[in-house]
Image: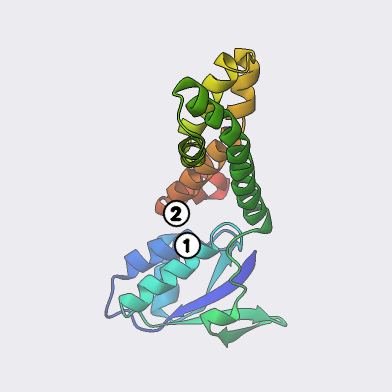
Amino acid sequence: MQKIGIKIIDLNKSTPRNIAKTLQSFIIEGDYSIPSIVYQMHNENIIELDVSKEENMPEFISTMGEFDEEEIEYQLYAFVEDKWEQRALDSFDLDRTPEWQLMTIGLVVIGYFVMAFFEIFAIYDWYSMRYELNGILSAVGAVVTAIIPLVGSLFSYWSATELWQWSGSFAFIFYFWYYLPILFLILYFIFWIIKIFYADRWYRFRYSEFN
């Protein structure tokens, strides 16, 4: 959690309450009430923000970009040795993506293509034996089909159960298990999108002091 200070320099070009509502979602430990934030802006005080690197740094950077587009004049500060020092946005720790997220995405992608490789053999047999295609057409068709989500798994399942005599449950688990981590990532990204669009409501839900 980074302590970032912000001072709004000019309020003539924007609505103070709108700015206050935007900054409110970044205030956890301090006074987060709208009147208090507006008061500090009118007096050009430094407003202390609590910005989590892993959770809302992307949102904070996006907010600063919106301030720039709306020509809202502001200054950013870092709390160094018990005092505020003015800093540029680039001087803060802007690593937005946690390592575990990058590793998870990498493993899911690798797992997907590893399974696609195994599916090629089953799909090849399906095309060559079921439809009696020649070797080249079966091979090309198997590669293309294997990389298509769900379709490759479905063809592999049919081939394994009908041609290789695998049990339906084993074939289903073998060719469809890797969609679980993919589903997890999709739900996780949906969760973050919702958090970004409803940041203020999210912090009131997560932190009881907002209620």
The reply to whether discs 2 and 1 touch (Cβ–Cβ < 8 Å) is: yes
In this rendering, the answer to whether 89 lies above or below 35 is below
The residue shown at (53%, 62%) is 27
Residue indicated by mark 2: 196
Q: CA distance from mark 2 to mark 1?
A: 6 Å
> In the current view of this chain or complex, which residue is farthest to the right?
81
Q: Amino acid at mark 1?
A: Glu
The one nearer the camera, 188 or 64, is: 188
* Quadrant in the picture for the N terminus: bottom right
Q: Amino acid at mark 2?
A: Ile
Helix, strand, or loop for circle 1? Answer: helix
Residue 129 visible in the picture: yes
In this rendering, the answer to whether 75 lies above or below 134 is below
Quarter location, residue 93? bottom right
Residue indicated by mark 1: 59
Quarter location, residue 115? top right
Helix, strand, or loop for circle 2? Answer: helix
The one nearer the camera, 90 or 17, is: 90
Mark 2, residues whose alpha carbon is within 10 Å: few (<14), some, or many (≥20)?
Answer: some
Residue 150 visible in the picture: no
Q: What percent of the width, then of the height, locates residue 7?
A: 47, 80
Quarter location, residue 62? bottom left
> In the current view of this chain or complex, which residue is farthest to the front?
134
Mark 1, residues whose alpha carbon is within 10 Å: few (<14), some, or many (≥20)?
Answer: some
Q: Specify whether 171 is left or right of 197.
A: right
In this rendering, the answer to whether 10 lies above or below 172 is below
Q: What percent of the width, then of the height, locates residue 21?
A: 39, 61
The residue shown at (50%, 27%) is 128
The residue shown at (46%, 25%) is 132
